[in-house]
Image: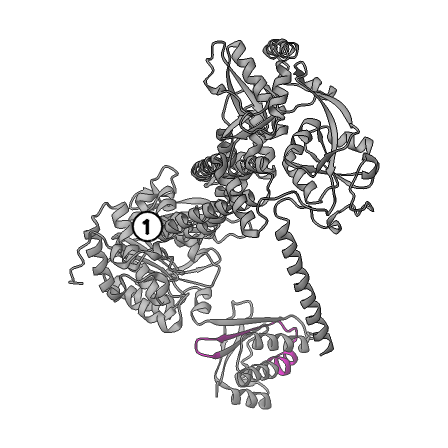
């Protein structure tokens, strides 16, 4: 069991971890997801003290590893780590890479270590490579050897730091297959990954990390199907978001159009979808709401999901209840009808902008 | 097309010239001065040669470093250019080759050289009168010994023995020119350390592997009469004076002229030779060579070989020198490697104090010319300690080689990826074991090629230990040259030996290179002692 309390890591010009408090139970298989640069790897490296935390405490099976008097070498022998860049010992053959630590650190005989090493090589499917050197192997093979090397120490916990990120897409599968097998053995696994499908399939618990903390901690079903946190939702659906606020009748329309343009080209939104977003904004906001509302306060959110290539525009505005889908100007509404796949109006009188209309832009 | 034709014509012309020059140099190997055009002075004097000092105006004069001849020449000869040589032999060879027009040296040296070089002339006008004497350190013991020595020398003058000694050493009869075996003297009143430059015949030179000569003869007689054992240390002339000043030697004598400047820093005995400074020139310039026994190319080579190696068992000098060079090199490599490694281990984890000290020492050692470092160690750091030159040389070269090894290690270990450390730590290796098990084995193959070239430079660098009285290979070559008056053969011999030595050490390192490179191990040996459960 791993307990992390108020963990903080500060570098000279960045703070990857602000405040992390979490408990990890034995046998948990945890996928850590989140945008780049949000402290996922740092969290992992703090757990086995490759990075020294600035503040906070970490206990591993009751031993406080953040205590300067702690015998880190002993703790690390029980906690394996698999790196993004494999880090196999290039001067040793495959079998020696696996045998080295058990012989040196656990006092196993060479024969014992060899037998165990061959069993592990069999498991990762590379028994015929025992006498090869690391640079004779492909990336996927190297990573499988690295996993076997870690397993040779029979650790209770294994940390995976983006194990497939450095791999050719064709080799991702073979490494994931090995990790999938491992997940069934009851070892505690903590996996930092960008492969969402893999994360979902393998884990029983997911950490979504953003801005130096764990934003959401839940089951894979919760995180992927029903995220509670807006940031999680945007990340899961790989949403690209543009927000526009209009505060008076004399707002800068060409300026707003330019902003939408930049947003579309930056996120590689297909040309057709982009022009429909333009059209929707013009017909809904510029032609109708600005004219109808006495003192317009309009908030527009455009979301584009890279995952399902779908764009959604949500427009909220002030004033008395005004269902634009029913009472809107006929010509404009006809145009909107032609580009939407779903359009809905909601009224919530307590919100800042009580009126809200949401348009799903049609793809074809 | 035209250009090409001109070019090829020019090329042919150069080849012909080169051929002619080579043919000429063949006949010149013994001692013939080359053609007039080779003279740097370009003096207008005809083939008749120089007959007075005034004719040397605007010319070039060769002198030995550390003597007073350069000052005298500059005072006497207008617009003269001085060429400095490490030994009188080199200066004489330069004169013979026409590199210099005159050779300014002590009268006895020139006088001695005329015995064997019939084409050498001493100009009548003396540049200066001078007296030669033994020198002693300016200490109480030095004073006492000096007084004793002076009394002995005065006695030799009085009873006419000095005349006999003079006649003996300036004769052409080789057999007579010898000193009794002074190494066997009893040390009734102790042992005296005498420093000599053994390249100045007839005052001090090597014959049959022993240092002999006019000055050595007197010193030996003195020791015999006063119950001292005599130990002679050979060094270059400037080191001789330094050795007396720092007390490394009890006294020194090898053609040392009495000057006021020298009197300030050491004590002189009564003069044991009344000489002077003279100018020697060649009888003819571009004229006929001296009489030769065998003028054919092969014949002269054979004669040179005989002179350089066979006569007086001179090959023993070369083997002695080789052993000394080898000893210094091997010890320095071993100690330097250990030193560099230990210092690296201290500095490896970024210890601020260790790094600061190391940086300072490396700055000091690497910034100093090797010769200066050795002399500082020998005359200043260990000035008052009785320590052999070889030990000082080993210490000096250990320091420089150690700093090279340190830099190599830092460079080699620096090439190892940070990920290798992390993987090792993550497995549970301690910092120290990570270094020895994971990092060092990967760094060594990176380091060894550069290490190899460091060793070659070390071997070559040891050639300067002659400055601190060590008789290494190069110094032995100098000694042989001072006896044979030949530049070619001893130098070639030394060069060949150095190449062999370097080749041998490189061969050895290559063996280690193959052994330490983990990637070159045989596949079968990887899993020694493990039953692989299959028949192959």
Is residue B531 a member of the stretch shown in magenta?
no
A312 or B183, nearer to the observer: B183
In this rendering, position of residue B438 left or right of residue B146: left
The location of residue B220, given as percent across then percent down, is 54, 17
The subunit letter for the residue under badge 1 reads B
Residue occupying the point 33% across, 71% down: A173
A109 or A222, nearer to the observer: A109
In this rendering, position of residue A178 left or right of residue A35: left
Look at the image and give the residue range highlighted in magenta. Answer: A285-310
Q: Which of the 4 quarters of the picture holds residue A142?
A: bottom left
Tell me the SS state at disc 1: helix
B87 or A221, nearer to the observer: B87
The location of residue B108, given as percent across then percent down, is 68, 27
In this rendering, position of residue B101 left or right of residue A338: right
Q: Which of the 4 quarters of the picture holds residue B70?
A: top right
Is residue A293 a member of the stretch shown in magenta?
yes
B27 or B186, nearer to the observer: B27
Reading the image, the residue beneath label 1 is: B427
Residue occupying the point 57% across, 35% down: B483
Task: Using the image, determine if residue B442 lies above or below residue B15.
Answer: above
How crowded pointer 1 is (Cα within 10 Å; few <14, some 14-19, many 20+) is rated as many
């Amino acid at each position: 069991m791993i307990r992390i309390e108020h963990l903080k890591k500060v570098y000279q010009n960045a703070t990857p971890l602000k405040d992390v408090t979490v408990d990890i139970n034995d046998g948990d298989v945890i996928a850590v997801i989140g945008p780049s640069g949000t402290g996922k790897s740092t969290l992992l490296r703090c757990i086995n003290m490759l990075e020294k935390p600035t503040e906070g405490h970490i206990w591993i099976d009751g031993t406080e590893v953040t205590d300067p008097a702690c015998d880190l070498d002993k703790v690390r022998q029980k906690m394996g780590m698999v790196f993004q860049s494999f880090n196999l010992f290039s001067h040793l053959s495959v079998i020696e890479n696996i045998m080295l630590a058990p012989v040196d650190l656990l006092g196993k005989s060479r024969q014992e270590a060899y037998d165990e090493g061959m069993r592990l090589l069999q498991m990762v499917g590379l028994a015929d490579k025992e006498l090869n050197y690391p640079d004779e192997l492909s990336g996927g093979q190297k990573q499988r050897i690295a996993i076997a090397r870690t397993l040779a120490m029979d650790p209770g916990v294994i940390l995976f730091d983006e194990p497939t990120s450095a791999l050719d897409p064709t080799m991702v599968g073979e490494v994931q297959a090995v990790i999938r097998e491992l997940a069934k053995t009851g070892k505690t696994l903590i996996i930092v990954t960008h492969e969402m499908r893999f994360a979902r399939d393998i884990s029983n618990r997911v950490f979504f990390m953003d801005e130096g903390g764990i934003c959401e901690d839940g089951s894979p079903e919760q995180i992927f199907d029903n995220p509670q946190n807006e940031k999680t939702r945007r990340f899961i659906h790989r949403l690209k978001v543009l927000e526009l606020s209009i505060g008076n009748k004399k707002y800068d329309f060409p300026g707003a159009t330019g902003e939408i343009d930049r947003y579309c080209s930056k996120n590689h939104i297909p040309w057709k979808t982009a022009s429909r977003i333009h059209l929707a904004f013009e017909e809904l906001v510029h032609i109708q709401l600005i004219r109808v509302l006495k003192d317009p306060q309009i908030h527009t959110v455009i979301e584009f999901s890279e995952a399902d290539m779908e764009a959604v525009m949500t427009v909220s505005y002030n004033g008395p209840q005004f269902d634009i889908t029913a009472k809107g100007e006929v010509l404009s509404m006809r145009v909107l009808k032609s580009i939407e796949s779903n359009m809905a109006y909601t009224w919530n009188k307590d919100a800042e902008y009580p009126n809200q209309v949401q348009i799903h832009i049609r793809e074809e | 097309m035209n250009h090409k034709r001109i070019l090829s014509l020019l090329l042919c012309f150069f080849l012909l010239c080169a051929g002619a020059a080579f043919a000429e140099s063949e006949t010149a190997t013994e001692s013939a001065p080359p053609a007039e055009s080779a003279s740097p002075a370009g003096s207008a004097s005809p083939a008749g040669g120089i007959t007075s000092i005034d004719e040397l105006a605007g010319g070039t004069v060769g002198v030995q470093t550390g003597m007073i001849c350069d000052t005298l020449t500059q005072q006497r000869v207008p617009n003269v250019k001085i060429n400095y040589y490490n030994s009188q032999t080199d200066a004489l060879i330069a004169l013979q080759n026409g590199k210099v027009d005159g050779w300014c040296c002590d009268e006895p040296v020139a006088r001695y050289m005329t015995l064997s070089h019939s084409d050498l002339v001493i100009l009548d006008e003396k540049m200066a009168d001078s007296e030669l004497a033994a020198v002693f350190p300016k200490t109480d013991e030095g004073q006492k010994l000096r007084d004793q020595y002076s009394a002995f020398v005065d006695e030799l003058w009085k009873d006419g023995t000095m005349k006999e000694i003079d006649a003996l050493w300036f004769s052409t009869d080789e057999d007579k020119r010898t000193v009794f075996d002074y190494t066997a003297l009893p040390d009734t009143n102790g042992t005296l350390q005498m420093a000599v430059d053994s390249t100045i015949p007839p005052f001090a030179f090597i014959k049959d592997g022993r240092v002999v000569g006019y000055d050595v003869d007197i010193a030996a007689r003195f020791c015999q009469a006063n119950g001292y054992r005599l130990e002679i240390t050979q060094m270059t002339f400037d080191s001789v004076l330094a050795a007396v000043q720092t007390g490394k030697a009890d006294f020194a004598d090898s053609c040392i002229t009495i000057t006021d400047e020298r009197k300030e820093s050491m004590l002189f005995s009564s003069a044991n030779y009344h000489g002077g400074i003279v100018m020697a020139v060649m009888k003819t310039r571009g004229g006929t060579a001296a009489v030769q026994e065998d003028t054919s190319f092969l014949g002269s080579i054979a004669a040179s070989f005989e002179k350089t190696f066979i006569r007086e068992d001179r090959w023993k000098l070369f083997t002695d020198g080789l052993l000394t060079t080898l000893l210094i090199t091997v010890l320095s490599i071993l100690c330097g490697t250990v030193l560099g490694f230990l210092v690296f281990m201290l500095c490896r984890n970024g210890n601020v104090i260790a790094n600061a000290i190391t940086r300072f020492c490396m700055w000091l050692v690497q910034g100093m010319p090797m010769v200066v470092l050795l002399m500082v160690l020998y005359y200043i750091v260990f000035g008052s300690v009785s320590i052999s030159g070889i030990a000082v040389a080993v210490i000096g070269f250990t320091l420089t080689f150690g700093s090279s090894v340190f830099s190599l290690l830092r460079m080699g270990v620096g090439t190892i990826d940070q990920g290798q450390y992390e993987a090792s730590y993550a497995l549970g290796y301690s910092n120290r074991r990570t270094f020895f098990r994971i990092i060092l084995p990967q760094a060594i193959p990176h380091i060894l090629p550069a290490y190899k070239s460091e060793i070659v430079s070390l071997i070559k660098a040891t050639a300067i230990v002659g400055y601190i009285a060590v008789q290494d290979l190069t110094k032995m070559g100098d000694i042989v040259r001072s006896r044979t008056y030949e530049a070619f053969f001893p130098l070639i011999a030394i060069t060949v030996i150095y190449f062999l030595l370097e080749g041998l050490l490189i061969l050895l390192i290559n063996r280690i290179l193959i052994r330490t490179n983990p990637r070159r191990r045989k596949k079968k040996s990887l899993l020694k002692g493990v039953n692989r459960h299959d028949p192959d």
